[in-house]
Amino acid sequence: MKLSRRTILQGAGTLSFALASIRMDAFAQTTPAAQGAEVPPILFVHGNGDYDALWMTTMWRMESNGVARDRMLAINFTDPLARSDDKVEQANRSSTEDQRRELTAAITELKRRTGAPRVALVGSSRGGNAIRNVIRNGGVADVSHAVLCGTPNHGVFATDDQLGNEFNGRGPFLRGLNEGESEVTPGTAFLTLRSDGMDKYAQADGRFIGKPGTPTGVATEGPELQGATNLVLGALDHREVAFHPRAFREIYKFIAGREPTRLAIVPEPSVRLSGLVTGTPGGVPTNRPVAGATVDIFRVDPDTGERKGNAVHSSKTGADGRWGPAQVESSWSLEFALASPDAPTTHFYRSPFPRSSDVVHLRAARPLGPADKDAGAVLIMSRPRGYFGLPRDVVLLDGKEPADVKPGVPTDSAATLRLPASEIGRNIVAQFGEERIVARLWPASENRIAVAELTY
């Protein structure tokens, strides 16, 4: 028997928060923490090809609701991209066993640091696969709560082709996780968060995975699990169901057993930033540290993107790839100039950082390619914590909707602007919703790329 309670969520363009659509199976084994109980330590788990920095805004919201920074940890998988076949080695890619091993070590470290007997795990996309794998294979005693955000629990596709692929719902990995009367492990409270049709990896047609017109064998409900509390978060996209404020509300409420006091991020008067420089060996995104990279941080005018004086911080990475710490103010718009070996010099323009963070990671932009050969300057508008949805969102680059952002189901997290050399030095406005970043164009002839990186 299923218990159900349904309400309506509006589109993603507003920060009004209605109750989510809820489906809770009778198999659910445990309940969230009681009112007033201490929130367990929380370990955040990123998705395929990603890094722990994506959880920065979520951790800021947790801190703004009284969760101590040292009771949170975000794992940075060494090789975050999945193999084409889980059992066949690929350079700079990871298997499900690699991720299970690294996540188990991170759980042990968070328990050691906090002295807590159990921790809560929150995963985005592929991160949910690692969470389920750990819990299913002996980790249930360590995990009180598991929150799976946009995880393709029944596959991105479910066909007889590529059975060794981790994301094939008919393959041995997912079949092993889903077998039995209940799809969750008793003893851990499970919550799934999914989109109502806007998740590009939960679509019946294969056009979003390069096979238009071919049935995938999965549906919008694919991220749900029998035995879990299953929430539908309206028109949020594949990443937003983990990183949007609406998702934060449900994550916090499930783990803490009460509503968050606030959804907004409370600024700190003085902000300390640091992070990791990573690379893309062989074109594969990794979280392996890059040595010998220089990071220069400039305060810039929020209306023009022009630098306001000399660098406020300069550092060079060692073998650990770390840069910083840098002391800035929470009202400053910033430019991070990254010179990484064998990569374009990348000028990242960012909105002000309201709070401190040690996961301000930097990975050089992709190399200039054939499509850029006639451009005097190249600027990329990037949204790591979500996709651009047209007509769902306000998305403007230099005053126009980007031509390389497809309408409908949000599938694109970056847009590129190429301009002639005569435009070098001009400021360009990148806008998504209420977030507005002003960047400046740099000469492509000097192997430089500008990136307007959105935080929200």
Image (cartoon, grey):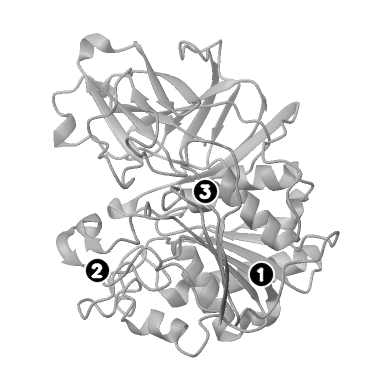
Residue contact between numbered discs 2 and 3, judged by CB atoms under 8 Å = no
Q: Residue at x 68, y 55 (%)?
A: 252
Residue 283 in the image: state x and y as whole percent: 28, 51
Check disc 3: other Cα within 10 Å, few if <14, some if 14-19, many if 20+: some
Q: Is residue 199 left or right of residue 15?
A: left
- Mark 1 → mark 2, Cα distance in angstroms: 30 Å
Residue at the farthest bottom position: 180
Residue identified by numbered label 1: 145
Q: Provide the secondary structure element on which disc 2 rests.
A: loop
In the image shown, does 38 or 369 lie closer to the viewer? 38
Residue identified by numbered label 3: 9
Residue identified by numbered label 2: 216
Image depth: mark 3 or mark 1 in front = 3
- Mark 2 → mark 3, Cα distance in angstroms: 27 Å
Of the image marks 1 and 2, the number of the one nearer the N terminus: 1
- Mark 3 → mark 1, Cα distance in angstroms: 24 Å
Q: Quadrant of the N terminus?
A: bottom right
